[in-house]
Image: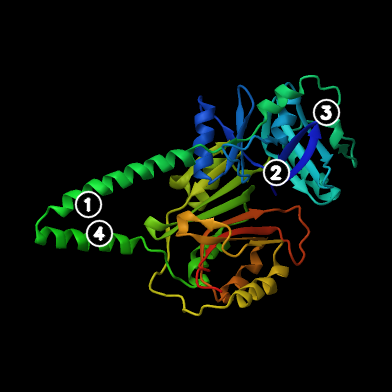
Amino acid sequence: MEHVFVAKIQQQEVFWVVGLRWYAVVEADAKQRAQRLAQQRGAQSWVLSGQTMCSVGLGRQRIARKDRSAYIAGAAFFARIYAQQTVAAIIKLPTRYFWFVAAHKGQVLVRGDHCFECLEQAQEFMASVMTDYPQMIALNEQGAYLDWAFLFQKRPQVQSLLTAARLRPCQWRFRSWMLWGLCLLLVALGYYQWWWQSAAQSAVASSSVASDEQAHELPLLPAREMLKPVLMHFYQLPVARAGWQLIASQCDYVLAEQGWRCRAEYQRNGTGADAETFLQQQQWERWARAIDLHVVEIEFPVYAVDLHVQHQATVPTLFQHLSQLQKIQPAFGTLHYRHRQDSLSQWQGRTSLRLQGPLRSVPLLFDLRAHVLWYRVELRVQTHKQPDLKTSQLEVLLEGAVDDEKIH
């Protein structure tokens, strides 16, 4: 769970970000690899930790280019303090959350940055991580925690630590606009050439363009049909197999391919089968790649959606739409929607809808009358959580684009 809060340090107001997703980086050019990984994962910001061995933390925190506020990755800050040690700690944040953080000689561990609502959950998670690292030193006493102020006691070089742990915005987004500009220029040149073609060639070209545009239209599918391939993918993934544990699985809808691209991450426990044996048992060898010594990622073939099933055009009023969201809200931990305010340019200006909650709550979305184009679904396995109405050990994050232009 990514968590952002404000805390002053040496009279400077700092935005602290904890709970990032961390990946080991084994390539020589760690910075380029980190930027590529951020692009592949759809991250908004990133930070590197480590020197010889590096890891990259990816976050959802958007950082504007002109924003002078300091956004600091808490785990990277912690790792820089203990750059010569293998340490872990449970720290109580000013927001009353309990933060587990772990690093190995300046490198944040893949499982070394997590937030919890209660101390018992943090302690259980810490015990599972330290089982894999017998040499790790716990800074807090057993059954206890450290205060947030502990990080800043007798730290004369705080500014250099803050600089090294500062989150960076993903620059690939700005390069993508340059590519779009080039594409528009090529389209304009093509149109100019088309203008001078004969009537027969013009007819052929126009029909070709029309068919291409039709292939890239937004799918107007009911939520049940749109999410069906994703849910089938999640249900078929083994949560644990041969000593390997599912960490997370993310699916993104690719408009050009008219289907979902899904990937899953598995982590090996200390006594699990070796990577080759595990992948052969699941028949995943040709789709797998190594993220870490004990973590593999599987990128599955595209799951196509059935575009022939169309959404029934029943446009609700604004208050009918809001009422439907309010009715399902108790089944989700988070539901964020602001009518016509969070516009998504990549989805024809539709409005953002974000939900987070148990996997079992997803079918409640099937009855929404307003059309929602679901374009990202992420499943995270959180075995430390105690299930209740709004939480589960199988937690999902859904991102959709609401067609609310006609909703009044």
Q: Residues at badges 3 and 4 in contact (C-beta under 8 Å)?
A: no
Frontmost of labels 3 and 1 is: 1
Frontmost of labels 2 and 1 is: 1
Q: What's the distance in space between the residues labelled 1 and 4, CA to CA?
A: 11 Å
Q: What's the distance in space between the residues labelled 4 and 2, CA to CA?
A: 45 Å
* Amino acid type, residue under disc 3 in the picture: Phe
Instruction: Work out whether residue 123 or residue 90 is closer to the camera in this orientation and state it.
Output: 90
The residue under label 1 is 191
Q: Would residue 404 be found to the left or right of residue 22 on screen?
A: left
* Amino acid type, residue under disc 4 in the picture: Val
Residue 152 is tagged as 3
Q: Residues at badges 1 and 4 in contact (C-beta under 8 Å)?
A: no
Numbered disc 3: secondary structure: helix
Task: Specify which label sits upstream in the sequence, 3 or 2.
Answer: 2
Instruction: Work out whether residue 190 or residue 161 is closer to the camera in this orientation and state it.
Output: 190
The residue under label 2 is 19
Q: What's the distance in space between the residues labelled 3 and 2, CA to CA?
A: 20 Å
Numbered disc 4: secondary structure: helix
